[in-house]
Structures are given as structure tokens and as C-alpha cells.
Image (spheres, coloured by chain):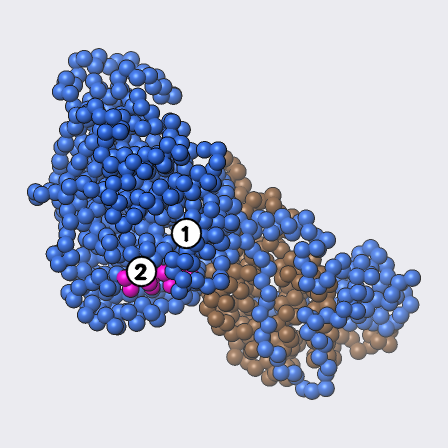
Amino acid sequence: MASSTSTRLEWIGAAIDQYQGRLIRFAARITGDAESARDVVQDTFLRLCREDRDRVRDHLPAWLFRVCRNRALDVRKKEGPLRSLDDSGTSPLEEPGTDPHARLESGDDTRRVLAAIATLPAAQQEVLRLRFQEELSYKEIGAVTGHSVGSVGFLIHAGIKQLRERLGAGDPASRPEGERADA
Amino acid sequence: MHDEPRDEDLTAYALGELDGEARAAVEAVLAESADARHEVDEVRAAASRLREAFATVPHQALSPAQRAAVEAEAAREPRSRRRSWSVAATLVAGVAASLVAMATLYRPFRRDALPPVYEPVQPLIEAPATPLPPAGHALIPPATRVPSEVTARLKALGYVDRTPDGFEQDALTPRFNSLRESSARFNTEAYDHIRDNAFVLVAQDPRSTFSVDVDTASYSIVRRFLQGGQLPPKDAVRIEELVNYFPYAYEPPTGAVPFAVHMETASCPWRPAHRLVRIGIKGREVPREERPPSNLVFLIDVSGSMNEPNKLPLVKAALRLLVEQLRPEDRVAIAVYAGSEGLALPSTPATEKGTILSAIESLSPGGSTHGSAGIRLAYETAAASFIEGGVNRVILATDGDFNVGVTSPGDLVRLIETKAKSGVFLTALGFGMGNLKDATLEKLADHGNGNYAYIDTLSEARKVFVEQVGGTLVTIAKDVKLQVEFNPAKVKAFRLVGYENRVLAHQDFNDDTRDAGDIGAGHTVTALYEIVPPGVAIDVPGVDPLKYQPTTDRVRGSGSGELLTLKLRYKQPDASQSARLDVPVEDSGRSFQDASTDFRFAAAVAAFGMALRDSPYKGDANLRTIQDWAQSGLGEDEGGHRAELVALVEQARRLSPNR
């Protein structure tokens, strides 16, 4: 018993190490503040503790993000949206106080990209984050959000397409002008 | 051959999401089309820009306390974790049914919100449409309106095998069914494991020591399960709390001692060869006009988890009932806690009833629970308006889900223990279901000079705050400990029925620093001992007879005819030194049928608890006989509480035809 407990502790500890930062970042997008995001993530891991390891092992990231997302939406529903996902495009984890459209003018590619993302519909933003920030697969994103895999594919495609349109040529390094000629 | 892949398939391909036929289809297109190849490159370039941008968002970590709380949970015995799952399983069906049953009792609170007993995927609430950046760009229709021809084409590619909204029919179904099932265990009600007290051979140990308990929460919890159509989890059944839920007609004290002791002996109904001894304690009644002035601090959990019809709205209704019972010299303050703690109402005289009632009314849920800071604030508020010689009490209303800050029960208990020394008493009121931390609340009340009740209906609130308000508010004796010494000439073995988590070490009896239970004004406390007389066979497993013992005929005092002596220690509410009371008792030799109605009813309730716990000591008791015993013990039944028990036994019979 003692050894299974210590193995369990190690497993939970490793899961915290690997996922806490990603989950807090993700939850903060929903709750609007880092403090309640931490509470949400603590809750998520407490639930993981009560879970049978064998049942979640094969889909741990999807499980964690799904539970975390539900919990965060609960919190937001009960506390009222402190800030909706795309009303300003800033979360307390990012640099606050800048209007997203103003940021579009800035030369810094990262800021431009983040500002452009902030102008997308909430559902698109969410799947883009899950795909490119959290590196979940379409299937995992579907399990987390309840969208079908096809919807996830469509949302991501639409999101990327809009971003490309909004950002235009962008950073020359990531979008060499000569590419079309080569193709 | 194949339909030409759509743009979104190129995106999926670019991101490495396609395989098999779908992938081959895209590759066939790519081989022929420079535009398609360009498109794939563009998607990959955009993806890497996205990754780079996202990577700049900093990571944060849990606070050390939060992490420690999670690790403490992970380190818990696996068995106790599993147990809470089975609680969850039995609850799922019960929740809906009991809510419906409750709705008739307090319709005003009914809402259609059910506690989240499983983990459905919640829809992301769409924020209002965003204003477009500089004009000229056509917006792609929102994803929720994926055109059906798109879906059809995706299906044709084998990329989607169902409609966008159908989560159930996913190809991943087996895997995510298991995810859903495991999520269904998220009911987090927690009950500490109870192991029934065993028979003790008097030749091995002639004494039994325990603390009184006036808590009644377990009865309300059991009732909630049964009325909801489920048998309660065994560990939610604490027999002493079932027995003590009911008032008994014990005579109140007449002298200086704050309580009277009444003992009765008759044959044991579930094992007629055994005897049953009932210890009945009755606290002094304090009439309303003699009640000392009260300094009350309500400490209300307003965290998000309290936002359910049977929680915060019921808390408010219960507090309104209590406020109606107050007298002009009483004072009330309201402290709240959630993400942060605060005073919703500074200490206010009861004459300003309107102010108090509107403060109660304005409580609204929000935030996560930070119980310890709230507890500190409440005790500080109580200390600031302390009334010498009065009732100084913190009344905590929560579902007990302390999940921020000091979360280990041990830390909380230590905090409460320290605070209790200031002369402020505690009443813990448990509300709601789903994540009720029964064990935590019981421990808080035990260590905080307090009592614990579970309030599931307005009528239960009325019992606690109106019918028995004196007992709830006014403590007449604290740290009440009982020690029973059995006469080996009359008793071969004994078993204390219930009080499993109240058992004390013998040496704690005379140790005034050891905390024990309190008795409120008018409270009754009932304890039962099942006794094996000499000459009746009893097998106590695992215990060998002692080798070096005096023979029983030479034991001093054994010829007295006394069955046992009850020794009782208690403190006056403001004293630190205890007084002692000795009460010897002889066996009247009565049969169960000749016993008092109170005796028969208490025995029936104890047997009901044993049946629900499926105790190894339940003997011949079954739900049918228990119902008869309870029926025979109804007596005058003021308030109809006993009749309710008979109905609950009947309900348990319906739910368990085999018992």
C-alpha cells in the first residue's frame, strides 16, 4: 500500500510539473484572472488524485484540459465573466492595457499575432490555443471542447485563414516573399 | 476517384493531422497542384508564427500551499479514495430524486440547476461578435454553422465520421466513454471510514471511555439518501448521531449539576440473551427569557460551490429563522468567505433586525473557498464584541469544501482548537450535497467546542434554530466525558453501540486538557451498551484469555449486585477544571417489551443504524423487526420525528428487499 501511494504521489507530482503552467495559462483565458485560474487548476489536480490512474493514463492531457475547462467555465458562470475572452484580447498573463487594434500597428510580430488572435471569435481562439500553444491534436481538442474533430479542423482552418488575411505579409522571416515563385 | 480536398483538409494535412485515405487524397492533389503546395506551406508558416507568439505567454505555477494540498490528497489511502467513488455512484441517481422530494418542502429555492454529477463538456459561451479590423475582408461563417456540404465532403474523405455536434458517436467512443465514466465520479462527498466498536472482554479491560456527542448530522444525511431513493453509504451512518437526533423524555436536573443521568436496562432486542444498557443524559433547560445575551457571528461560505438551491438560499432561510428567535440584548455579525474573506455585517444589535435581515438577503455566491481566513476573521469579530457570561458563538454555514489556503484537516483542526480556547463556541452547519465534507465539519465541531448539524430542508433548519434553539446556542456543560466500569461478576463482555470516533483512552478521562463533547441547554444524549452476561458464550476473535488474573469471585465490590458504575466528568462552560459524578446501576432484569418507550425507540434507531451499516453485530435485527420496535417506541412523538423514522425504515425496506 505504501509503495502504491508513493508511486501515485510521484505520478501526480510529475503531472503537476508537466501541466500546471499550461493549465493555468489556459484557465486564465476563461476565468480572466490568474488567481482563480490557479484555484481551478488546483481543483483539476485534486480530481486527478481521485481518479483511477489506468483510466486516464492514455489520454491525460485531454482529461486535464477538459476538466480544467469545465471547472473554469463554472467559475466564470458563477462569478460573472470578469472579462470575456475577446473583449480586449488581453489576459492578466499577457501584457495588459493595450488595445488589440492598436497593437496591430506595432512592429513586433509577436504582438501583432497575439492582437490579431484576440479579434477572432472565442471558439476559434480556443482551438488555436489548444493546437498551437498546448500542442493538442484535433482529436484531443475535440474531447476537451466537445466539438467534433471535423469542427475542430474547420475552426482551425478558418482561424488560420483569417489570421493570414489580417496579418498580411507579416514577419518576412516566417513568410518569405519568394515562396510563391519557387512553388 | 476522390473529391478534391477542401481547404480545411489541406490545413489538417499541413498540421500532420491526416492519415490513411484522407492523407493519400491530399497528397494526390499536392502532386499536381502548385497552389495546393503553396497553401500547405502558408499554413505551416502561419502555424509557426502562432507557436512563437503563444510561446511568449508566461507560465505560472500553483502556490506551494495549493501544491501541498494536491499532494496530500494524492497521498491518501487508496481505499478511502475508492470509497468516495462508490458514494458518488450511489448518489448520482439519488440527487435528482431527492431534489424533487425537497422541492415540495421549500419550493422557493427550487431551481432547475442540478449539481454537476458528471463532467459533460460545456459549451464555450460565445462572446459578442468582434468588430472587424480594417474593412474589406470577408468573414468566414462561424464554425457552429458549418455548411452541410462541407460536412458531407469531410465525411467522404473519412476525416469526419459523424455530424459536427455528435460527440457520442465519435470514432473515439470507447476511449472517451471511459473518460466520461471516470468523470462521473466527481462527486466528492467524503465520509471517514467507521469500524464498528467490537465486544471487549471485561476480564481484559473492564472500562470503556468516550466523549458525549450531540451531533445529529448523520441522521439528516441518511434521511436525504433514503428519501432520494438510495441506501446511504455505510460510513455516512454514525449510529450515535442517529440515536441522538431524537428528543427523549428524560427528566431535567433539579440540583446544581447541569444535567441529569438516567439509566435503564432491559434485554437486547437483536440478541435476547444479551442485555442492553441505556445511558440517558438530559441537560438543564434554559427558558428563552433566562438565556444569557448572545454574541453571534455567522460565518457564511459564499464560494461558487454554494450556488445551489439547497445551499446558500437555504442558509439564508435558516438564518432568518434564527434572527426571529433573538432577543433585544443579542448581537449578530456576518462574516463571509470565498476568494477573499470580509465582514458583510459588523456586530449589530438584534434590535436592528431590518439591517440584519437585509445583510442576510444581500449575500451572493462567488469565488473559491478560503475557509481558514474566514474562520480567523469570524473568531476575531466574536472576540471583539465578546459578552462576559454570555453566549459567544461562531455559526459556520458551508458545504465544507475548503479548497484554498489551509486545506489539510489537521491544520484546520489545530486552528479551531486554538480559537476555541478564547471562550467562543462553534456551531458547524453542513449544507448541500455533492461535495459535502462531512468528516471535516464533524472534526471542526468536535475540536471547536461545538456542535454539528446537517441542514437539508427548511424543516431541519426549524428544528435546529427554533425547536432546539436553546441547545444550539447555550452550552450548559463542556468537555463531557463518560467512563463506564463494568462489574466482572455481572458482565462478561460489553460493546459500546456507536460513538466509534468518540472513544477516548482511559487516561484521558481525568485529563482536563483533553477536549470532549459539549451539551447544550435541554439536549439529550443517549448511549447504549450491549452486555454479554456471564455464562453466555461469546467469541471475541483474536483475543486470547489472560493467563494471570484473579478469579472473579474474589473481586472487590463484585458482590454488590451492581452491573456497572458510570463516571462522568464535565466542566461548566467557562471553567477549566472538571467536576465528577458517579452513578452506579443495577440490572432491573426487565424484558425489552417491559422497557420504556424511550428505551425501545432508542434501541430501534441503533438497530436501524446497524442494519444500514450491515454491522457484524446486528444479530437478529432486520428492517421488519426494527420497524416493529420503533413503532412500539413511538410514545407521544412531539413534532412527529419518530414517525418519520418509521417511514424511513419502511423506505429502506423498499430499497433493499433482501434485508
Q: Which mark is residue B436?
A: 1
Which one is in front, A13 or B298?
B298
Pick the quarter of the image with the C terminus of chain B.
top left
Q: Is residue B412 left or right of residue B20?
A: left
The residue positioned 53% from the left and 38% from the top of the image is A4
Dot 1 lies on which element? Answer: loop
Query: Magenta segment, which residues?
Result: B309-321
Q: Is residue B565 left or right of residue B617?
A: left
Between the C-alphas of marks 1 and 2, the distance is: 18 Å
Dot 2 lies on which element? Answer: helix
Residue B293: % across, % down = 15, 60
Q: Is residue B251 visible?
A: yes
Which one is in front, A34 or B504?
B504
Which one is in front, B271 or B28?
B271
The residue positioned 89% from the left and 63% from the top of the image is B2
Colour-to-chain, blue: B
The residue positioned 51% from the left and 70% from the top of the image is A32
**Looking at the picture, does residue B483 appear above or below residue B220?**
above
**Looking at the picture, does residue B569 appear above or below residue B3?**
above
* Amino acid at the residue labelled 2: Ala
The residue positioned 48% from the left and 52% from the top of the image is B97
Residue B581: % across, % down = 13, 35
Q: Is residue B443 visible?
A: no
Q: Which residue is mark 2?
A: B318
- Output the chain of dot 2: B
**Looking at the picture, does residue B329 appear above or below residue A14?**
below
Q: Which mark is residue B380?
A: none
Pick the quarter of the image with the N terminus of chain B.
bottom right
